[in-house]
Image: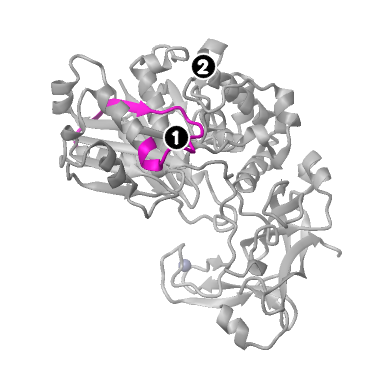
């Protein structure tokens, strides 16, 4: 396996773009990344495109039909919320394997105003729909149960989950790429409309549109193209699926596959959680972020509430430690499914390279960044980047 | 499935094949003959715990269990009454089932979640809809045990 570096990144502000198409949004992010890398599409040897809602519509090729049809291999990836990060891993493997020197990953999604109400089940006759009749398969409830499980095991309170939302909203005020940039108070979060206990409205990520892109290169190409610019190495890129666990088939187990991915990623990078300067993790719901503090080893098992009380997860500039989701996280930044896994790698890169695009929220002296995504069904990716 | 229903006698239909209405309503799963793992399926190609194919036999499941965790759903599909409680119920056979928890106060469980943890519950079956052929569709729920 060869070393792989991120030469360029691109991202459009997450939000709503009803006047644009999915390939247009992806093409915009791709062009920004190519420009940032200082190359053109003619230099790219392989392209992995991540998009979920148009998975059968050749989005990758349609992006190239916008920015340059060079005839290179294109892979279209769908892997639930881990779609973008799985595309990035395809591009990573292309370089790591020695097959290509320059690859590109783009994650893009257009969700409009449709909510995260997937997973209802049922056949063609709605009388046999199980949603609300045999419990709920809706995401807010599934992740609500994961939070309730933490309450059961460790006595965690609604307030702990709420504090995560307050923290991430505060972070988002410094991120111009974030869909929402408003602060919320603890009272706002706790008194907001309950969506699925214990997740209130502000503890659920919004839906929207977005795109992000990354250009990956080999070490030789980096020397040739970087022109003295420092560029981070992908020290680990890991993908796992859900192993058999006793309740997994009725209560999706978001923890075990994250723990396995974390263990493999730390091992591959030769690093541990204590070495991580910043983490972008998959906070589709506040309850998810809390359990992932433990799953990623940012604190010990059962210690997430204490971690939060001691300022864990907050930006050092706010007096915190072990900063998590300084971008504002999915809760504020937004969660256009296919774009998410590439966007969180962009965020990590920007901190490691002190990029202009993160100038108001830089984590000082960031040397190691971790990006985590989980797609229910389930797929987990972890990328660890170092500089 | 629609064809089979069209040809069958009119009458109540289970919402999922794991719900058996006769002789008395109960759930049925399948058990792996190799490692003993249980699944909430009537048909399955192989065991996803140990990988052994073709050794799965039907087993009736207990109508009593204990609540592991729950959520209170306030936003759902059009036509679904909210709030309702969704719960993961552990059965004594070592398998868990998901369904609505009824005859409880959702607001009360939000205030005191620990009241639900380990709560002994029992299976009940109720009609939830009529299908296109006019047959009653029966679903199962759990309620606090009466005995
Ligand atoms: Zn088995």
Residue A101 visible at all: yes
Residue A247 image offset from top left, x and y in percent = 58, 56
Helix or strand or loop: what does disc 1 sit on? strand
| Quarter of the image where one finds residue A301 | top right
Q: Is residue A185 magenta?
A: no
- Answer above or below: position of B129 versus A178: below
- Answer above or below: position of B76 versus A187: below
Label 1 belongs to which residue? A210
- Answer above or below: position of A297 versus B1: above
Compare marks 1 and 2 and give the one earlier in the sequence: 2
Helix or strand or loop: what does disc 2 sit on? loop
The quarter of the image holding the C terminus of chain A is top left
Q: Is residue A362 left or right of residue B143?
A: left
- Answer above or below: position of A379 versus A42: below
Closer to the camera in the image, A340 or B39: A340
Q: Nearer the viewer, mark 1 or mark 2?
A: 1
Q: Is residue A31 left or right of residue A71?
A: right
| Quarter of the image where one finds residue A43 | top left
| Chain of residue at mark 2 | A
| Chain of residue at mark 1 | A
Residue B138 image offset from top left, x and y in percent = 72, 72
Q: Residues in magenta?
A: A1-25
Residue A233 visible at all: no
Q: Is mark 1 within 8 Å of ligand 1?
A: no
Residue A159 image offset from top left, x and y in percent = 71, 29
Residue drawn at x 21%, y 33% as measured from the top left: A41
Label 2 belongs to which residue? A174
Dot 1 crowding, Cα within 10 Å, few <14, some 14–19, many 20+? many
Query: What colouring method underlies this structural image?
Result: one colour
């Amino acid at each position: 396996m060869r070393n792989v570096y991120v030469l360029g990144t691109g991202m459009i502000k997450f939000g709503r773009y009803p006047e644009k198409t999915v390939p247009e949004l992806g093409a915009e992010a791709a062009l920004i990344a190519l420009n940032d890398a200082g190359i053109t599409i003619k230099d790219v040897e392989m392209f992995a495109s991540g998009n979920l809602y148009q998975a059968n519509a050749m989005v990758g090729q349609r992006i190239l039909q916008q920015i340059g049809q060079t005839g290179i291999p294109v892979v279209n990836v769908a892997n639930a919320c881990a779609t973008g990060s799985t595309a990035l891993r395809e591009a990573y493997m292309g370089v790591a394997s020695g097959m290509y020197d320059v690859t590109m990953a783009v994650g893009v999604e257009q969700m409009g105003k449709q909510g995260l109400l997937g997973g209802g089940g049922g056949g063609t006759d709605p009388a046999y729909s199980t949603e609300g009749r045999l419990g709920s398969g809706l995401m807010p409830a599934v992740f609500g149960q994961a939070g309730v499980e933490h309450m059961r095991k460790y006595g965690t309170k609604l307030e702990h989950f709420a504090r995560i939302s307050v923290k991430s909203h505060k972070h988002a005020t410094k991120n111009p790429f974030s869909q929402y940039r408003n602060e919320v108070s603890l009272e706002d979060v706790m008194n907001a409309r309950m969506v699925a206990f214990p997740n209130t409205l502000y503890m659920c990520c919004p839906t929207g549109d977005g795109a992000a892109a990354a250009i990956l290169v080999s070490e030789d190409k980096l020397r040739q193209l970087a022109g003295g610019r420092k560029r981070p190495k992908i020290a680990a890129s890991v993908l796992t699926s859900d192993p058999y666990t006793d309740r997994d088939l009725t209560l999706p187990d978001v923890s075990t596959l994250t723990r396995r991915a974390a263990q493999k990623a730390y091992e591959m990078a030769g690093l541990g959680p204590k070495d991580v300067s910043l983490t972008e993790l998959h906070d589709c719901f506040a309850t998810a972020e809390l359990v992932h503090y433990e799953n990623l080893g940012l604190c010990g098992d059962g210690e997430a509430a204490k971690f939060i009380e001691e300022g864990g997860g907050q930006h050092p500039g706010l007096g915190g430690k072990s900063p998590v989701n300084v971008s504002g996280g999915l809760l504020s930044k937004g969660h256009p499914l296919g774009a998410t896994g590439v966007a969180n790698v962009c965020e990590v890169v920007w901190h490691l390279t002190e990029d202009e695009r993160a100038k108001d929220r830089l984590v000082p002296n960031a040397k190691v960044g971790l990006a985590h995504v989980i797609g229910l069904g389930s797929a987990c990716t972890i990328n660890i980047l170092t500089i | 499935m629609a064809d089979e229903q069209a040809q069958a006698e009119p009458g109540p239909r289970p919402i999922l094949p794991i719900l058996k209405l006769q002789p008395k309503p109960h759930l049925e799963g399948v058990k792996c003959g190799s490692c003993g793992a249980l699944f909430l399926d009537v048909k399955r190609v192989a065991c996803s715990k140990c990988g052994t194919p073709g050794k799965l036999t039907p087993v009736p499941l207990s109508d009593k269990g204990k609540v592991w965790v729950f959520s209170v759903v306030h936003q759902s599909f059009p036509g679904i009454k909210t709030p309702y409680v969704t719960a993961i119920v552990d059965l004594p056979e070592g398998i868990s089932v998901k369904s609505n928890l009824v005859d409880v106060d959702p607001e009360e469980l939000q205030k005191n979640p620990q009241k639900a943890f380990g709560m002994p519950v029992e299976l009940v079956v109720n009609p939830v809809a009529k299908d296109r052929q006019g047959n009653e569709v029966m679903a199962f729920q759990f309620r606090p045990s009466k005995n």
